[in-house]
Image (cartoon, grey):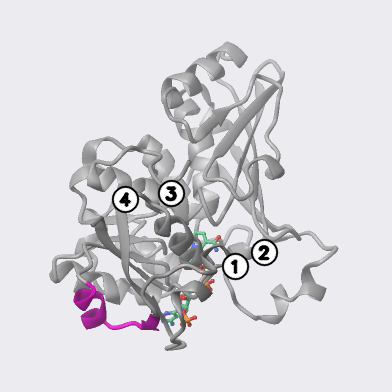
Amino acid sequence: MGVRVSIVGATGYSGGELAAILHRHPRVEITGVFSGRSGKSAPFAALHPLLRGSNGPDLTPFSTEGVLAAGTEIAFLATPPEFSVEAAPRLLDAGVRVVDISGAFRLCDAAEFEKWYGFSHSSPILLSEAVYGMTELCGPELASARLVANPGCYPTSIIMALKPVMRLIDAGAGIVCDSASGVSGAGRQSAEAYSFCEVAGGFKAYNVGKHKHEPEMRQALGLDGAADFVFAAHLLPVVRGILSTIHVRLRGGAGAPELSEAYGRAYSGKPLVGILPPGSLPELKNVACTPRIEIGFSVIRPGRAVIVSAIDNLLKGAASQAIQNMNAMLGFGGTEGLL
Ligand SMILES: NC(=O)c1ccc[n+]([C@@H]2O[C@H](COP(=O)([O-])OP(=O)(O)OC[C@H]3O[C@@H](n4cnc5c(N)ncnc54)[C@H](OP(=O)(O)O)[C@@H]3O)[C@@H](O)[C@H]2O)c1
């Protein structure tokens, strides 16, 4: 018998991906799957196309008691932050470890949280306890974490591309990040703005200067609110994937060899991170439906670099990174269940 896990929000896109991956994880047993606001019930096999014909627990409406009755050791919350912020403390109090995929526990500062998420945090003490789970950039802290804040999808694509090379970048000269996400980034919602006719054939920027992922990136990169950091999100008419194009100035004489060396140092032995040769840039189609991130860069003239990263927003940007974090929490191999 494997480690007992439950998925809350299993009717959603990220929750469905979690169910599909965890079902084939060799050291895990899914003992509970729960719906959220809809209160839906359904057979396990209906949660994801890859689960057709599979056996597992039926989807039932969420309750803390239901998660405990499933003998859950680790609960994944694939729910909106308003829900996670209330559910996680109750589960933690009952001794369940939590990996939260929403933004409820990513920011350290409660005032920043309120400013960007639009409501005040009911458990601010947990903001200092939560481990920000950018798995490849974490140390041993994941092994003992009770609560892991799984990073956002855009932040994963940008922080993983920038953090290892920050000391080579002249942050004072400004950092500009243009990111484009497939429509599944907005979840399985039926709002008119995400309907086929509104999205197909279009391409637009949105929430510029107001996107709640921006403070998460500043926090992880050590940039305060005054730093000249620009994040512009775009809605790309594909189902899945995020491509981020990051414009930076390099310090002193730094160039391609220094960037390659810094990425190599950060990510050697990390099989889910692909660093491309200088001048070669990632494409969405090479990472879509995979747990991998690809990062490439081009130094287009001395001191000026363009860095590009690509991920699948529902996998490296959500479900598969959450499972990397679970593997680290349990001392399993980093790619177990993923490759
Ligand atoms: N989509 C992405 O690319 C992505 C990437 C990283 C992180 N995330 C984050 O992961 C979380 C889930 O995202 P998603 O894209 O998978 O969303 P989704 O497809 O819209 O699914 C949302 C899930 O949460 C439940 N839910 C919705 N409103 C709720 C409420 N008020 N109370 C309780 N449960 C509620 C839904 O349950 P019912 O069906 O029962 O209502 C559903 O299971 C969000 O916090 C999102 O920001 C998403």
Neighbour tally class for label 2: few under 14, some 14-19, many 20 plus, Cα within 10 Å: many
Q: Amino acid at mark 3?
A: Gln
State how far apart marks 1 and 2 are (Cα): 6 Å
Using the image, tell me which numbered label, if any, was put on residue 326: 4
Q: Earlier in the sequence, mark 4 or mark 2?
A: 2
Cβ atoms under marks 1 and 2 closer than 8 Å: yes
| Residue located beneath label 1 in the image | 186
Query: Disc 1, ligand 1: is the CB inside 8 Å?
Result: yes
Q: Which residue is mark 3?
A: 321
Q: Considering only vertical position in the picture, is 257 above or below 275?
A: above
> If you read the primary sequence from the N terminus, does the residue marked by circle 2 or circle 3 appear first?
2
Residue 22, position as x, y percentages in the image: 40, 57
Any atom of ligand 1 within 8 Å of the CB at mark 3? no
Q: Is residue 225 visible?
A: no
Position of the N terminus by quadrant: bottom left
Three-letter code, disc 1: Ala
Dot 1 crowding, Cα within 10 Å, few <14, some 14–19, many 20+: few
Residue 126 locus on image (x, y percent): 22, 62
